[in-house]
Image: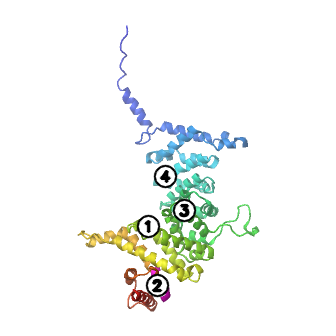
């Protein structure tokens, strides 16, 4: 006789839940068992029996099985979770990834492994652990010599993450200093790559390195490319191939062709170079390079950023790139006034027009709403200054110093031409002098009185012809 099946033993569902819960990684729903399986598969890929293959198998080694790729990509996504990242660290996954990077010829697999390490390094405890592993550090830096752009991108992202951690930044700076060939690789990427994402990320690494260590910046500025490893330096009569500044210029041009808004990092690198004498000389020493950099920045500030048909608020988005660009232009202008491309009649009037336009937009951005009763309080003013106004103040200081230098070199003929062509007007000069006035005092030294006198002379010409 048929009967209904017996109910499950009591507590079975609870037991299954406990078992399932024990398989979860931290507070996530990710399975430890599944992750073990994926990592075991990686170990098999780089096991000695699989790596000892004939040249006929090289092409196969360059490919990644679709199922394995999907699984390891899932781990890549999962590694953004701190619980998963910590579990990977506990399971010694970085050692597994190091083995893959040292032995695998598959670009996609190498990219994913570096990408996972990059995600893990976002968490301070793991970043310190990764950075303290000397062997892993060597393998990761060697990835900068890779020819695969995605792998280079992930390697650069990982390095930037580590350089941004104060506790380990000096470790990576010193390692990079100990590998001069990294200079060659970075120069090659900046001068030849068309991958803008890669160029921006490499630029961020260089910018961070120079910001952290002026000594390293000076070494890279002064040194050309290192000689080939298999060719002693004394036996080589050839001049080094790479130079830093031209490579930065090429990267900036490529980035600009895609999106000028991404130029911020390369403008800041050039600005950092102008903070040391050797850096300025590296920019202006070669006439062609100096001219190309000047023309690029001149075109950006006069025809690209903060134009007359842009709303004044655009300045908030462009203030940092404008500050860097104008700072570099000012440094070149002050150090190489005899160069043909810096002839006064060619550059002064367009630059004055651009400088004053930015100052006028700045005044609009800093205006307080008329109906705001709180804007006049001292506390509100201090809060504003510590936020957006801080960056605007830096920009204003750069603009005023540059504008003052240009005004001191103006001739009456140039002023008359500016009035005729519309670059100078009573309103523009009034705005310029109002911004410059706080930088000067009636009792300042003789050199500054000269500057004030030039301003008054230039302004008097404009007002007279108005």
Q: Contact, CB < 8 Å: mark 1 with mark 4?
A: no
Query: If you read the primary sequence from the N terminus, does the residue marked by circle 1 or circle 3 appear first?
Result: 3
Residue topped by disc 1: 318
Element marked by disc 2? helix
Q: Which one is earlier in the sequence, the residue at label 4 or at label 2?
A: 4
Relative placement, left or right, of 270 versus 183 is left
Residue 160 appears left or right of 282: left
Residue 387 within the segment the image draws in magenta: no
Instruction: Determine contact: label 1, label 2, CB under 8 Å.
Output: no
- Which one is earlier in the sequence, the residue at label 3 or at label 2? 3
Q: Is residue 260 visible?
A: yes
Label 4 belongs to which residue?
Answer: 126
Q: Which residues are magenta?
A: 402-418
How far apart, in angstroms, are the residues tagged by discs 1 and 2?
Answer: 25 Å
129 vs 449: above or below = above
Quadrant the N terminus occupies: top left
What residue is disc 3 on? 257
Q: Are marks 1 and 3 in contact (CB under 8 Å)?
A: no
The x and y percentages for residue 77 are 48, 45
Q: Quadrant of residue 69?
A: top right
First of labels 1, 4 by sequence position: 4
Residue 187's quadrant in the figure?
bottom right
The residue at which mark 2 appears reads as: 407
């Amino acid at each position: 006789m048929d009967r209904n099946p017996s109910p499950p033993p009591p507590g079975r569902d609870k037991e299954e839940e406990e078992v399932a819960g024990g398989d979860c990684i931290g507070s996530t729903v990710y399975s430890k068992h599944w992750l073990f399986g994926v990592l075991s598969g990686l170990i098999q890929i780089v096991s000695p029996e699989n790596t000892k293959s004939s040249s006929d198998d090289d092409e196969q080694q360059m490919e990644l099985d679709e199922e394995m790729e999907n699984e390891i990509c899932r781990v890549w996504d999962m590694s953004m979770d701190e619980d998963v990242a910590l579990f990977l660290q506990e399971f010694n996954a970085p050692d597994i990834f190091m083995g893959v990077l040292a032995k695998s010829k598959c670009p996609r697999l190498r990219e994913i492994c570096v990408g996972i390490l990059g995600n893990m390094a976002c968490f301070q405890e793991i970043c310190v652990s990764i950075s303290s592993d000397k062997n892993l550090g060597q393998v990761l830096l060697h990835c900068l010599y890779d020819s695969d752009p995605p792998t280079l991108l992930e390697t650069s992202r990982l390095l930037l993450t580590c350089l941004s951690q104060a506790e380990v930044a000096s470790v990576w700076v010193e390692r990079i200093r100990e590998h001069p060939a990294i200079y060659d690789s970075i120069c090659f990427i900046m001068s030849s790559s068309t991958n803008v994402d890669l160029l921006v990320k490499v630029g961020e690494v260089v910018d961070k390195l120079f910001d952290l260590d002026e000594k390293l910046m000076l070494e890279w500025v002064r040194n050309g490319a290192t000689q080939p490893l298999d060719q002693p330096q004394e036996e080589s009569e050839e001049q080094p191939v790479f130079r830093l500044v031209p490579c930065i210029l090429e990267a900036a041009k490529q980035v600009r062709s895609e999106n000028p808004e991404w130029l911020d990092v390369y403008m800041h690198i050039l600005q950092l170079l102008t903070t040391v004498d050797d850096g300025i000389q590296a920019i202006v020493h070669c006439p062609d390079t100096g001219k190309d950099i000047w023309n690029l920045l001149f075109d950006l500030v006069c025809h690209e950023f903060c134009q007359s048909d842009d709303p004044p608020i655009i300045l908030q988005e462009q203030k940092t790139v404008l500050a860097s660009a104008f700072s570099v232009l000012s440094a070149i202008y002050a150090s190489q006034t005899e160069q043909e491309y810096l002839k006064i009649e060619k550059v002064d009037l367009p630059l004055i027009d651009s400088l004053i336009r930015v100052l006028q937009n700045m005044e609009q951005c800093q205006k307080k709403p008329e109906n705001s009763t709180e804007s006049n309080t001292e506390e509100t003013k201090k809060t504003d200054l510590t936020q957006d106004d801080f960056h605007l103040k830096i920009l204003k200081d750069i603009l005023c110093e540059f504008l003052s230098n240009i005004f001191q070199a103006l001739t009456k003929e140039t002023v008359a031409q500016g009035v005729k062509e519309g670059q100078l007007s009573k309103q523009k000069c009034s705005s310029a002098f109002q911004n410059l006035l706080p930088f000067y005092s009636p009792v300042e030294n003789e050199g500054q009185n000269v500057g004030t006198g030039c301003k008054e002379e230039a302004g008097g010409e404009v007002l007279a012809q108005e």
